[in-house]
Image (cartoon, helix red, strand yellow):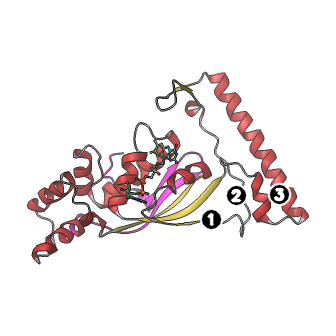
Amino acid sequence: MTVTEVVPDNTIEVLDHGFVRLDDAMADDLSVVNGARVSFARRKTEMEEADEGLIRFLMRDRHGSPFEHNAFRFHIRCPIFVAREWFRHRIGSFNEFSMRYAKATDEFYVPAAEDVRTQVGKPGAYSFERVDADLAEEARTELEALYEEAYATYARLVEKGVARELARSVIPVGAYTQFYWTVNARALMNFVSLRNAEFAQLEIRRYAEAVERFFAQEMPVTHAAFVANDRTAP
Ligand SMILES: Cc1cc2nc3c(=O)[nH]c(=O)nc-3n(C[C@H](O)[C@H](O)[C@H](O)COP(=O)(O)OP(=O)(O)OC[C@H]3O[C@@H](n4cnc5c(N)ncnc54)[C@H](O)[C@@H]3O)c2cc1C
């Protein structure tokens, strides 16, 4: 799939039980153009060639604020450890599933065999390499067994009357959570520049790829300018 193809149902499945769904967007390239052209009391209703050049100029010279007049609202389902990395991105709004109020999910992330990896090298300069098939299968089996035991303990404690907010202590960070994330294009570009990147962890990178596809779908000229600018957010 190329990044500009429209995604059916606005949902991209990620990992074994996750997804990125574009719930709604108020976002187009024209919002960038008009955000910038208001300096000269000018407003466009349609994109023209010169406007594409203007977007490239704004991106290159890091005039960032015109890229903020838009919003993407995503619904995301991902493992808790991915959400923890995601929530470090402070420019945006989040609301997350609560294990205080609702029963914990019994769906957990088990990596595909080809995604089980080892780290080689020193801190700050690791490379990640696939492990052999036997170790991959062993890791998957160990994870499944641990998840099963953790969830059974959780269910037992809740059944006996322990509050969900406390019983959740046994739930591993491989459990799936879900949240809404509303973000403007400038902060979104910062997110994908860091997370759809070589040094990002593989799992969040898969999610960032999905986010980037929606960004390209809604704001193709801005996305192309971002890519041309070495994927540096303005
Ligand atoms: C590969 C990788 C490894 C990482 N490893 C670690 C780690 O080991 N430990 C760890 O704690 N974190 C780690 N992080 C998280 C990282 O430090 C950032 O917290 C995270 O990527 C969010 O980036 P951000 O601050 O640019 O995004 P946002 O919070 O969305 O901010 C966007 C931009 O707004 C501006 N901004 C936001 N808040 C402030 C502020 N308070 N002051 C000034 N400017 C602000 C900055 O220009 C910032 O780039 C890692 C991230 C990556 C990608």
Query: Mark number for residue 143?
Result: none
Residue at which label 2 appears = 105
For disc 1, the neighbor class at 10 Å (few under 14, some 14 to 19, many from 20) is some
Q: Are marks 2 and 1 in contact (CB under 8 Å)?
A: yes
How many discs mark residues in the rendered view? Answer: 3
Amino acid type at image mark 3: Ala
Give the extent of the magenta segment. Answer: 1-30
Q: Residue furthest bottom?
A: 41
Residue at image location 66% in from the left, 66% down from the top: 98
- Examine the structure image and report whether residue 217 is included in the region drawn in magenta: no
Q: Position of residue 144 (x, y in %)?
A: 73, 40
Tell whether 87 sits left or right of 65. Answer: right
Instruction: Mark 2 vs mark 1: give the one in front.
Output: 1
Residue at which label 1 appears = 97
Residue at image location 55% in from the left, 49% down from the top: 82
Residue at image location 72% in from the left, 67% down from the top: 100
Residue 6 is at least partly visible in this image: no
Residue at which label 3 appears = 155
